[in-house]
Image (tube, grey):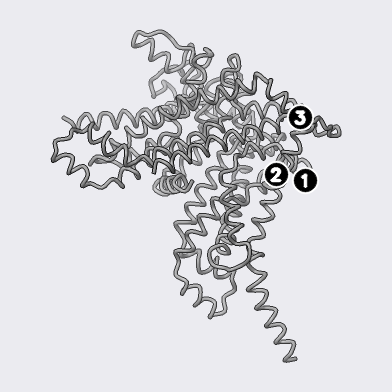
């Protein structure tokens, strides 16, 4: 009897020390194997195959990669993403920094303004897109009505291939900028007040203080904003899906939208996986370069 | 003078961010021929658009679906995230560091690579058109684990030791002792998880085809791009307003927490 109790106690201790930690992390391990590890492996396997899910898989060697290399639509979608980022990132940084600088002054109602700028961040991209589709309307959209009121010509925000992607980039900036205002505010508050006081004694004006003190000090925040918006930009999907379907003339076809179409319209699983795999490598590469750059800067 | 300019710019800024939402609400209750107007007060307010939507699409069902999906995911992420976070911060075992690095690595992994294989997995599990397909892949996320791990590290070891001496089981320690002392972490993870999953639309578009199983953003998206809104602006805007309402309400109540949570999650990455 006593021996049994002892064994039970011993087992209990072993259980606590040795097995319990693994029990605790097991949900993660299972999740990782099922939804991350296996998919990565299977995705690479799929890139060498042709498959529409129903018919048996067919080995095609490097055909998918060859196809990707000559696929003008894929390169177009990459180009579109780059156009998006080139407009979105600078615009985002300038607007966010400007608003953060204003909010960093001694003002009343600070939390109201902050909350107002933050509003679009929390609302679903679907809502924002439906809303902006109306604002961007050619005949009766609010923006064109405003343009006419001040005596300018109407713009084909979503119908002109040169304007469509910039329009989406402007909308995305409007949606996200509130978050970056807050991040910059946090960054601005880390700048020691003495720096400004010293600069004032030497007669520096507002702009000089901004460019010589503020900007260098919040460099880390700027790079973080760049990395976050890059990842966001590479994930662009619902905006073109709802607004333009990728048109006009594929000018708003984003990479994720293209992967979605290949996979779930045409059921080219092998090719869609190849696109996803290749695209993910590009993202990792870009983010890696950006991070290296940040580390060097600091 | 300087202050006046400052406030003018700030107020103009908030108008730019708020006006479209107010316009959306006002347009959704306006007669169809007045929607193009810039004015916010329609000549006659009617809620017809909202009634029509309830007749045309199962939006109430979609609301419940979204609530079930986002609720379960948030609950799961809190439970599992703190369990794994506890093991990684307070227990000793072989492979602990390896697991931690794997988790950090998965945070940077682009979802584009796993999208297609995950869909195939859901097909093989027979989870197309089911809650499981929407919920299970999201029950766990790297962000929550890292957040809890960090937070639990800041809680004094004495608290845990005392609980152990009192004979508390390890599960009791996590949910009975650490949780009440980790309210900020719970709120942050809870808000971020709930909001991202409430707003998620790509994954539902992929795994759900049956209209009665759709989440709210998905149903509204398909209503807007499909022909069923019959290019009636008011209908689309009313649907969008209904989709926005729950999160906006939550935001108005927990505004401070929303901003704090989103900021800290941005700073983590």
Q: How dense is the environment of label 2, judged by Cα within 10 Å: few (below 14), some, or many (20 and up)?
A: many
Name the disc covering residue B195, or none.
none
Label 3 sits on residue: A62
Q: Is residue A31 left or right of residue A223?
A: right
Mark 2 sits on what residue? B133
Query: Could you tell me which residue is drawn at 61 percent across and 57 percent down?
Result: B99
Q: Secondary structure at mark 1?
A: helix
Q: Residue furthest bottom?
A: A2
Mark nearer the N terminus (2 vs 1): 1
Q: Residue A273 in the image: x percent, y percent? A: 71, 33
User: What is the residue that sits farthest to the right in this orientation?
Assistant: A56
Q: Label 1: few (<14), some or many (≥20) within 10 Å?
A: few
- Circle 2 SS class: helix
Q: Kindly identify which residue carries mark 1.
A: B125
Q: Nearer the viewer, residue A62 or B243?
A: A62
- Residue A99 x, y percent position in the rendering: 32, 34
What quarter of the picture does the C terminus of chain A occupy?
Answer: top left
Residue A95 visible, this orientation:
yes
Tell me if residue A116 comes above or below residue B189 in the rendering. Answer: above
Answer yes or no: do the residues labelled 2 and 1 have beta carbons within 8 Å? yes
């Amino acid at each position: 009897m006593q021996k049994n109790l002892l064994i039970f106690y011993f087992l209990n201790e072993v259980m606590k020390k040795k097995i319990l930690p693994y029990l605790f992390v097991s949900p993660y391990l299972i999740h990782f194997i099922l939804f991350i590890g296996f998919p990565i492996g299977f995705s690479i396997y799929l890139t060498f195959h042709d498959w529409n899910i129903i018919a048996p898989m067919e080995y095609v060697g490097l055909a998918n990669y060859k196809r990707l290399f000559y696929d003008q639509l894929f390169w177009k979608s990459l180009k579109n993403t780059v156009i998006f980022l080139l407009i979105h990132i600078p615009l985002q940084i300038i607007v966010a920094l400007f608003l953060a600088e204003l909010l960093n002054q001694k003002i009343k109602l600070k939390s109201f303004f902050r909350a107002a700028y933050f509003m679009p961040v929390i609302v679903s991209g679907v809502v924002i897109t439906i809303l902006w589709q109306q604002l961007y309307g050619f005949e009766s959209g609010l923006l064109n009505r405003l343009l006419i009121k001040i005596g300018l010509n109407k713009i084909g925000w979503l119908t002109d291939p040169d304007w469509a992607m910039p329009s989406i980039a402007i909308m995305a900036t409007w949606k996200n900028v509130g978050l970056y205002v807050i991040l910059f505010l946090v960054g601005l508050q880390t700048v020691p007040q003495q720096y400004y006081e010293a600069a004032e004694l030497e007669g520096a004006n507002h702009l000089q203080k901004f460019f010589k003190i503020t900007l260098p000090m919040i460099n880390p925040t700027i790079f973080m904003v760049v990395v976050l918006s890059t990842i966001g930009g590479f994930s662009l999907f619902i905006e073109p899906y709802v607004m333009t379907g990728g048109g006009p003339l594929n000018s708003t076809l984003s990479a994720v939208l293209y992967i979605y179409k290949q996979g779930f319209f045409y059921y080219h699983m092998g090719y869609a996986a190849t696109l996803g795999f290749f695209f993910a490598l590009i993202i990792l590469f870009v983010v890696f370069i950006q991070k290296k750059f940040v580390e060097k800067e600091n | 003078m300087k202050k006046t300019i400052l406030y003018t710019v700030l107020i103009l800024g908030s108008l730019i961010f708020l006006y479209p939402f107010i316009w959306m609400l006002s347009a959704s209750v306006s007669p169809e021929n007045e929607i193009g107007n810039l004015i916010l007060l329609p000549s006659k307010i009617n809620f017809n658009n909202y009634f029509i939507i309830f007749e045309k699409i199962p939006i109430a069902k979609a609301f419940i679906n979204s609530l079930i999906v986002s609720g379960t995911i948030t609950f799961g992420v809190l439970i599992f995230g703190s369990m794994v976070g506890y093991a990684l911060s307070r227990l000793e075992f072989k492979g602990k560091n390896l697991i931690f690095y794997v988790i950090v690595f998965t945070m940077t992994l682009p979802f584009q690579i796993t999208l297609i294989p995950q869909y195939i997995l859901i097909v093989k599990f027979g989870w197309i058109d089911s809650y499981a397909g929407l919920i299970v892949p999201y029950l766990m996320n790297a962000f929550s684990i890292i957040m809890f791990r960090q937070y639990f590290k800041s809680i004094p070891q004495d608290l845990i030791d005392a609980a152990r001496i009192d004979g508390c089981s390890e599960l009791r320690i996590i949910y009975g002792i650490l949780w009440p002392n980790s309210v900020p972490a719970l709120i942050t993870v809870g808000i971020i998880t709930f909001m991202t999953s409430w707003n998620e639309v790509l994954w539902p578009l992929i795994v759900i085809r049956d209209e009665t199983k759709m989440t709210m953003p998905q149903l509204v998206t398909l209503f807007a791009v499909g022909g069923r809104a019959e290019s009636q602006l008011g209908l689309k805007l009313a649907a969008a307003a209904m989709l926005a309402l729950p999160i906006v309400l939550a935001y108005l109540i927990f505004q401070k927490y929303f901003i704090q949570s989103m900021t800290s999650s941005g700073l983590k990455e």
